[in-house]
Image (spheres, grey):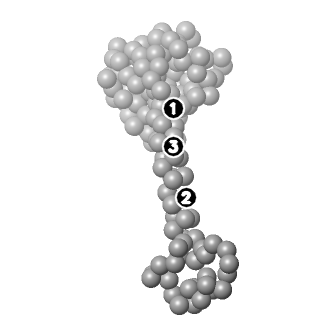
């Protein structure tokens, strides 16, 4: 349909054609609508992908390679070199999962980790295997939450 918002050159071009008239303005509106529709479908999926699933520390071994939030009781905290290790479920070497805080994380200087023993925590990150045991590398404070 030809409307009053088209330029005279656009109208002339449309009038000379026998087929449906699609102006650059109409193409832009169509593309904008298509982009908005795709964005509306993609955004909820993206937000859900960023939210980690909460699991018990006893289920950590079932979620290798997944980004999750592991919930459990800290049984022991220890250091090796300048690395901190937070074991949940049981003490080393029988822990259900370890939160590893490497020395280059900027968190490894905090002695407050020792105060976590006996407390319920949530550790968020991707579970990897280290020597057959589940482990999450903790690089920022927001990955470790005291309940």
Residue at image location 52% in from the left, 64% down from the top: 32
Report crowding for label 3: few under 14, some 14 to 19, many 20 or more residues within 10 A (C-alpha). few
Q: Position of residue 79 (x, y in %)?
A: 48, 25
List the residue tagged with mark 1.
125
Q: Give the quarter of the figure containing the C terminus.
A: top left
Distance, label 3 to label 1, CA atoms, is 17 Å
Distance, label 1 to label 2, CA atoms, is 35 Å
Q: Is residue 81 above or below residue 4?
A: above
Residue at image location 57% in from the left, 85% down from the top: 10
Front residue of this view, candidates 144 and 131: 144
Report crowding for label 1: few under 14, some 14 to 19, many 20 or more residues within 10 A (C-alpha). many
Q: Is residue 40 above or below residue 128?
A: below
List the residue tagged with mark 2.
34
Q: Position of residue 114 (x, y in %)?
A: 37, 23
Q: Position of residue 36 (x, y in %)?
A: 49, 57
Front residue of this view, candidates 146 and 31: 31
- The image quarter containing residue 24 is bottom right
Helix, strand or loop under label 3: helix
Q: Is residue 83 visible?
A: no
Helix, strand or loop under label 2: helix
Front residue of this view, candidates 33 and 67: 33
Q: Is residue 84 left or right of residue 62?
A: left
Front residue of this view, candidates 54 and 14: 14
Report crowding for label 2: few under 14, some 14 to 19, many 20 or more residues within 10 A (C-alpha). few
Q: Earlier in the sequence, mark 2 or mark 3?
A: 2
List the residue tagged with mark 3.
46
Q: Is residue 101 above or below residue 73?
A: below
């Amino acid at each position: 349909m030809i409307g009053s918002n088209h330029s005279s050159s656009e109208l002339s071009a449309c009038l000379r054609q026998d087929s449906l008239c699609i102006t650059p303005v109409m193409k832009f509106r169509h593309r904008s609508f298509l982009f908005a529709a795709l964005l509306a479908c993609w955004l909820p999926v993206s937000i859900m992908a960023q939210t980690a699933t909460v699991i018990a520390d006893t289920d950590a071994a079932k979620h290798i390679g997944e980004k999750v939030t592991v919930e459990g009781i800290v049984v022991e905290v220890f250091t090796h070199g300048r690395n901190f290790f937070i074991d949940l479920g049981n003490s080393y070497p029988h822990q259900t999962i370890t939160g590893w805080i490497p020395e280059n994380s900027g968190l490894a200087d905090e002695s407050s980790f020792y105060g976590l023993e006996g407390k319920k925590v949530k550790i968020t990150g991707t579970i990897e295997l280290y020597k057959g045991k589940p482990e999450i590398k903790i690089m920022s404070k927001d990955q470790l939450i005291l309940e």
